[in-house]
Structures are given as C-alpha cells and as structure tokens.
Image (spheres, helix red, strand yellow):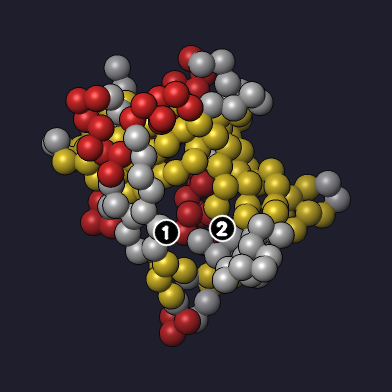
Amino acid sequence: MFQKGVGATLKVEIITASNQAALRVKNEPFPLVGKLDVVRLQNQWAYNIMFCPAAQVRWQTFPQEKYQLDEVVAQGFALGAFDGQKPVGLGIFVKQRSRFLYLADLKINGSYRGKGLGKQILTSSLLLAQKLGYGGIYTIAQDNNLNACLFYLNFGFEIGGLNTRTYDHSAQAGKSDVYFYFEF
C-alpha cells in the first residue's frame, strides 16, 4: 500500500499496534552548520544560506518525546521507516482544520540519514494527506537547523512564514521558526 523499500530491506509503513515500537525512535544529535536567513521582500519570501566556519559547528539533540499510539491516531497518524523489522525513522502527522496537514516531527537515525528515508516518509504522507482531503502539508524548522531547512526546500516545500519571537526570553533566544508549506 505504501512506498516500496528504499533499499533491499528499507521500507516505510503506517504505524499500527503491530509496529508501534517505531514511536520510540530516539532523537539523535544533528549538526548546526549554519542558518537560513529568511526575509520578506515585495510580498515574496527570500532566503540566504549562511554556513558557519567548521570550528563553530555545534551539535543539538531535541528532548525525547513519549508518543502513545492511541494519542497519535486520535490526532492524525504516524509513518515509520524500518530496516527489516528495526525502526529507524519516524514521521508524526497531526490533522488540522486548515487545508494543510501538520508534520509535527520527522526524524531518522543518524546512520540511516542520506538514504532517502525522510523523502520516503514525506512521499507516503502526501498520498495519505490527499486521501484525507488536504491541499498540502506544512511543518516548522528552526532557522539554525540548516540541514532540515534545506531538506524541506529541496523536497519542494516553500517558505510560508517566519516567527521571530518564539524563543524570546528563553535559552534559545535569537532563533526563529521557519514555516514550510508543500501544496499539491
């Protein structure tokens, strides 16, 4: 029903009771290699890619979520990436009242990054979103998570918004959230 395997044993499946272990895919460190500098000019979104010097690259790991299958299904659905039976990636999708389905989380184990699993999860989600009557998918990435921002842009998402205040008065002050939209 979903995508054929990316490799010989790699596949993407909707998460059900039989494979819900994928909901526990761990968050792993990712490099902060720069920033997507987003601006709005003449009613159009534009951006500059700003890489930092190698000596300034830092690593970040998001806090671990505690997804429960019944909660995920009540709010939307999840797709897992598997190497055989081993869960190696996860996408969490939340239904919205708008035309866009929300991609709340996308993560791939570090040793499986770059193998097309993130793209496979998104491609599978597009089929499901269309069946559910959505006009597209949106997600949010921090501007300093340059690899994630470029992943979404390269997949075909467009910038649709910028929130520069999300992290005010927090340890992450100075960061912004970039809103990415993929329309069918």
Q: Is residue 4 left or right of residue 123?
A: left
The mark tally for this picture is: 2
Q: In this rendering, is residue 164 above or below 86?
A: below
Q: Which residue is mark 1?
A: 62
Please tell me how crowded label 1 is: few (under 14), some (14-19), or many (20+) other residues with Cα within 10 Å. Answer: few
Question: Looking at the image, can residue 179 be seen?
Answer: yes
Q: Which residue is mark 2?
A: 142
Q: In this rendering, is residue 35 above or below 92?
A: below
Q: In this rendering, is residue 54 above or below 157?
A: below
Image spot of residue 129 (x, y percent)? 50, 22
Image spot of residue 54 (x, y percent)? 44, 80
- Which of label 1 and label 2 is nearer to you? 1
Residue sitting at 47 percent across and 82 percent down? 56
Residue sitting at 55 percent across and 52 percent down? 141
Q: In this rendering, is residue 111 above or below 57?
A: above
Residue sitting at 40 percent across and 71 percent down? 59
Q: Is residue 85 left or right of residue 75?
A: left
Image spot of residue 144 (x, y percent)? 55, 65
Q: Earlier in the sequence, mark 1 or mark 2?
A: 1
